Amino acid sequence: MAHDVRVTIGQLEVSGDRTANLQAVASAFREAARVGADLLVLPEYASAFDPRGTGPEYAEPLDGPFVSGLRRLAREHDLAVIAGTLLPGDDGAAGTSRAVNAVVAVDRAGALTGVYRKVHLYDAFGHRESDLLEPGDPAAAPLVVQVGDLRFGVLTCYDLRFPESARRLVDAGAQVLVVPAAWAAGELKADHWRTLSRARAIENTAVVIAVGQAGKGVTGRSVLVGPDGQVGLELGERAELRSADLDPDELAAARERDPSLANRRYTVVPLPR
């Protein structure tokens, strides 16, 4: 019998003050540890955020204060974490200066187990994320990490609108899809967020944990969706932490009842850059 995995959703309000943000992250770790969580999930841009556009001035290397802080806190609290951050870009030598929107995974021993660099940049609804950020390589290996008896696949924010991103993670073994986000507010945007989260869960018979930022310019409204598309947890617009237990046996039973993954006839392959 597989063991449940307890996940804490950390819907934080993030500012441009990196020290204050790391303090908020530390508080989330303490609360997640208090309730016995195995994994803490934090939003996109958890290290620093500006709703007008988060650019290279907020970037830090993987050995910088934010990721180093995550690793220290994971060791102290014996707790894995998945969190969004901003890394320095590679194209500065070409005469531009852009950063990389990334999600890092750290295990409970404090080891950095993976980095996902956002593939789909948010050039939509009047935003131009590509002016400030470099896209990740769509052919890079999917980020799937083991926490307890479940495998968690990582995508972020705008990726949620592209079903092939989620399907590629499921093909790599993901049972739970984790979506750190700073989902921009606007007409119908909260409805899209909820609807797309449910769609990704149903079509992949996977759990979806979509963790949004709270605060100005973003929607909050983090959700945990079961493989049947039912919303098990839904947060409001303000900063909040909530926890839930995921049962691997229940997920396996859901996939047996609904074998759509086994019945499909198409594969997903990355387009060339």
Image (spheres, rainbow, N blue to C red):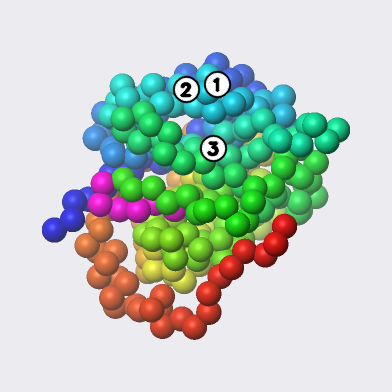
Q: Position of residue 161 (x, y in %)?
A: 61, 61
- Local SS, label 1: loop
Q: Is residue 116 left or right of residue 232?
A: right
Q: Residue furthest right?
A: 95
Q: Which mark is residue 135?
A: none
Q: Which mark is residue 64?
A: 1
Q: Position of residue 269 (x, y in %)?
A: 59, 68
C-beta proximity under 8 Å, tags 3 and 1: no
How far apart are labels 2 and 3 at the CA level? 13 Å
**Residue depicted at x 55% and y 21%:** 64
Q: Residue furthest left?
A: 1
What quarter of the picture does the N terminus occupy?
bottom left
- Local SS, label 3: strand
- The tag earlier along the polypeptide, 3 or 1, is 1
Count every numbered label the image shows and give the total. 3
* Amino acid residing under circle 2: Ser
| Residue underneath mark 3 | 84
| Residue underneath mark 2 | 68
* Amino acid residing under circle 3: Gly
Please give the range of residues in magenta.
148-153
For label 3, the crowd category at 10 Å Cα-Cα, with few meaning under 14, some 14 to 19 and many 20 or more, is many
**Residue depicted at x 44% and y 65%:** 171
